Image: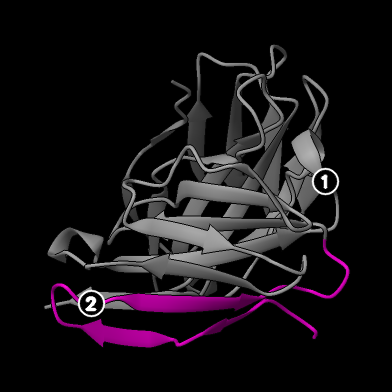
Amino acid sequence: GAGVSQSPRYKVAKRGQDVALRCDPISGHVSLFWYQQALGQGPEFLTYFQNEAQLDKSGLPSDRFFAERPEGSVSTLKIQRTQQEDSAVYLCASSLVPGLRAGELFFGEGSRLTVL
Amino acid sequence: TQLLEQSPQFLSIQEGENLTVYCNSSSVFSSLQWYRQEPGEGPVLLVTVVTGGEVKKLKRLTFQFGDARKDSSLHITAAQPGDTGLYLCAGAGDTGGFKTIFGAGTRLFVKA
């Protein structure tokens, strides 16, 4: 597609529910990132994929968070047993360049998660 | 832990004024980017600076990368209401791995 597409745009979950957030990156982009952005803050790194390989997951806040990109294109961020502190905007970004030079990111519009 | 500190956190100015936003770190980055984010949208890349001391201009915006590649500034000349938004700096390519680190942002409001 022309840009990074994320769905759903908005998700309201009850505490304890599992949620899945989808990211469709720009076609041909090797690198894919997930970020978490709290209200009024900058994006915080969660995880990085180079094609289908998850090379860095150091930003995932707990083992309730899981991300995958099985075919090196679409990615899913899954949050199990959601907590109120998980409420945030989850941003997906892709980049044509792999690895350490993947500095120029193209972002989707984000998925806003509200946990009640 | 790498950090990018932005200042000021919030800035409210009149149309036509000039402003400078700063981005500082104790770490060296191979490149640094500036993004602008509007409510309900993802950040959009404005510029990437790579070389220490580099200066780039984008219409009324001037970006500078520090000589030591640890800091950067964004200067806006004759601000307009359309410049309103959250300005984020981001650093990439350090020895810490694959992540691009973002600052907390400077929220700019330009009043007509």
Which comes before the other along the chain, label 2 or label 1?
1
As displayed, is residue A2 above or below residue B105?
below
Is B72 magenta? The answer is: no
Residue A10 vs residue B43: left or right?
A: left
- Chain label for disc 2: A
Q: Quadrant of residue B54?
A: top right
As displayed, is residue B101 above or below residue B3?
below
Q: Which residue is mark 2?
A: A114
- Mark 2 nearby-residue class (10 Å; few <14, some 14–19, many ≥20): some
At x 11%, y 78%, the residue is: A116
Q: Which residues are magenta?
A: A1-29
Q: Are discs 2 and 1 located on one and the same chain?
A: yes
Q: Amino acid at mark 2?
A: Thr
Q: Quadrant of residue B55?
A: top right
- Pick the quarter of the image with the N terminus of chain B: top left
- Looking at this view, is B64 or B112 the one in front? B64
- Looking at this view, is A35 or A51 the one in front? A51
Q: Which residue is mark 1?
A: A98
Q: Secondary structure at mark 2?
A: strand
At x 74%, y 58%, the residue is: A52
> Where in the figure is residue A65, as x and y percent of width and height?
38, 57
Is A2 magenta? The answer is: yes
Q: Quadrant of residue A36?
A: bottom left
